[in-house]
Image: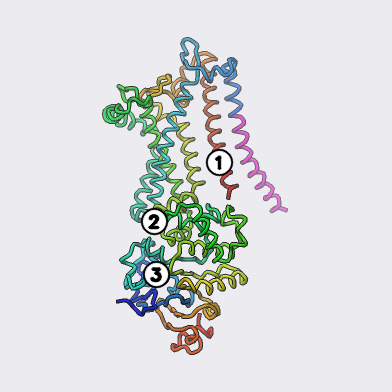
Amino acid sequence: MKRARGDRVFWLLAFFSSLSVIVMFTLLFYELLSNSVPIWKDGMSFITGMVWDPLKGLFGAFPFIYGTLLTATFAILLSTFLGVGIAIFLSEIAPSSLRVIISSIIELIAAIPSVIIGLWGIFVLAPFVRDNLQPLLQHLSFIPLFSGKTLSGLSMLTAILVLTFMVTPIVAAIAREALLMVPEDLKEALYSLGATRYEVVRHVCIPYARQGIFGGVILGYGRALGETMAVTMVIGNTPSISASILNPGYTMAAVIANEFTEATGDVYLSALIGIALLLLLISLAVNLVGRMIVWKWQQEG
Amino acid sequence: MAGHATDKIVVRNLNAWYGDFQALKNINLSIKKNTITAILGPSGCGKSTFIRCLNRLHELRSDAKIEGEILLDGKSVFNMDPVEVRRKIGMVFQRPNPFPTMSIYDNVAIGLKLNGVRDKKALDRVVEDSLKKAALWDEVKDKLNMPGTSLSGGQQQRLCIARAIATNPEVILFDEPTSALDPISAVKIEDLLVDLKGNYTVVIVTHNIQQAGRVSDYVAFFWMGELVEFGKTAEVFENPKEELTEAYLTGRIG
C-alpha cells in the first residue's frame, strides 16, 4: 500500500513538473499579447512601420526586425561554415592531443559572459573593423552591402562578427558530436572503395550527421536572434534601415533592453512588449521550420 | 623480387601493432590468383588485422603501426597511393554496411562516381552488372531508388558485395561476411564467393571451420597473432602438420 502511494506521488510530481512548462509558456505568451494590445490597434503598420521616434509617438518595428534578421542570418551563415569546418577537423583530422586542446578552448569561448564579449567588441573589434576591415571592403563598395562608412566602428558588421564569435562554438560542438556518431565501418567502407578523406567526409560523414549538424545550426540561429548584451554594445543602436552592413543598426533584443526603463506612456511600453512578442514568434518559427526539416529528413530515411 | 607467377599477393615478415599491442607477428604467406584463401582462427587472433593491412585500412587508425612487406603483383603496396591500393583491393565488412543516406543504386554507383564516371548509361550498366554478379538484381531491380538500408540483412550484405565489385577490383577481402547473417543468407553469400573466384582473387576471414572447408582453396590458420599453418585447405584439414591446428579443427581449443 505504502509503495503504491509513493508511486502515485512520484507520478503526480513528474506530471506537474512537465505541466509547469506548458503553463509558464502559455502565461508568458498571454502576458506579451495582452500587454501589447494598444500597439496592435493599427494592425500591421506596427510591423511594417519604418520610423521609430517615441518623442513623436511613431512606433515602427521594422528597423529592429530588419537588424535582427540581417545580423543573425549573416552570423549563422559564417558560423555554420566555421563551425562545421572546426567539427570536421576535430572529428576526422586532428591528432588526439590537439583535439582535447581545441575542444576545451571552444567550450571556454561558449562560457564567456556576453558582456565581456561586448567589451572586447567595443575596444578591439570595432577599431579593427574601422581601420582594417573597412578599407578592404571599400574595394567592394559597388555592392550595396558594403557601400557605407563607419566612423566609430560600431556597425552591423561588428555585430555580425561578435555574434559569429559567440555562435560558432555552439555549432562546432554540436556538429562535432554528430560527426563522432558516424559509424567507423561506414567511413571504412568508402575508404575501401578508394575514396580520399575529403570524399569520405563529403559522402559519408556529413550526410550521416546532417540532422545533428542542422540541429546545431538552428540552436545557434536562435541564440543569434535573441542575443542582447554583446550586440547592443557594438551595433550602434540606430533605428535605421541600411543596406550596408558598415552602417549602424539596431536589433529587437537591443531596443527592448535599452529603452524599457525609459519607456513613458502606455503606447511606448506596449510597443516594446510588442517587439518582444515578435521576437518570440520569430524564434519559434525558426525552431519550428528547423524541426520540420529534420522531420522530413527522417521520413526520407 | 616477384614471387611465383600466380602469386597475386605476397606477404613478407608482416608485423602490425595497435599502440603497444602487437596484433600480427612476422607473417609470411602468398595468396594465389583466382583462388579463395580463408584466414581462419578464433576471435582476437589477428585475422581481421591481417586483411586490413592488405588494403592499408589498418593505417587509418591513429595508433596503428605496420612493418614488413606486402606485394601486389610484385609491387609493394606501401609504395603505392593508398587510394590506388584500395581500388585494386576491395572489401566487404562483417556488419552489412550500405550507406544509409544513399539509394540502392547510389550504393553501387558511388565507387565509380568517385572515379569520375559521369556517363549515366555506363553507370546503369555497371550497377546492373554488379547487382547481377551479387545475385541481387532480381530482388531490387524495381526499387533501385529505395534506401539501401531498406533491404534485409542478407540482401544488404549482397548489396555491399555489389558495391565492392562495381569498381572492378582485382582482389576482394571479406571480413567475416556471414557472421551477422541468418543461415540461409549465409549460404547465398558462400555460393557467391565461389562464383566470384573466376574473376577475382578472394580472401575471406572466418572463425567458422565448416565455412572455410566449404569455400576455400587455401587456408591460413592464425593463433594469437601468428600464422600457425598455411596450405591447401584439403591438405590442412585432413592432415594438419601442427598440433595447434589439429586442436582447433577438432574443437579442442577455440
Towards the viewer: A181 or A187: A187
The chain under label 1 reads: A
Q: Amino acid at mark 2?
A: Thr
Mark 1 crowd level (few <14, some 14–19, many ≥20, 10 Å Cα): some
Name the quadrant containing residue B188: bottom right
Count all numbered tags in the image, as a single digit. 3
- On the image, the x and y values in percent for residue A41 come to 60, 15
Mark 2 crowd level (few <14, some 14–19, many ≥20, 10 Å Cα): some
- On the image, the x and y values in percent for residue B5 come to 37, 78
- Give the label on residue A196, or none: 2
Q: Residue furthest right?
A: A1
For mark 3, what is the residue? B54
What type of secondary structure mainly makes up the magenta span? helix
Say which element carries label 3: helix
Q: Residue at x 35, y 77 (%)?
A: B26
For mark 1, what is the residue? A293
Q: Amino acid at mark 1?
A: Ile
Say which element carries label 2: loop
The chain under label 2 reads: A
Q: Which residues are magenta?
A: A1-27
- On the image, the x and y values in percent for residue A163 come to 40, 34
Towards the viewer: A22 or A84: A84
Q: What is the C-alpha distance between the residues marked 3 and 1? A: 42 Å
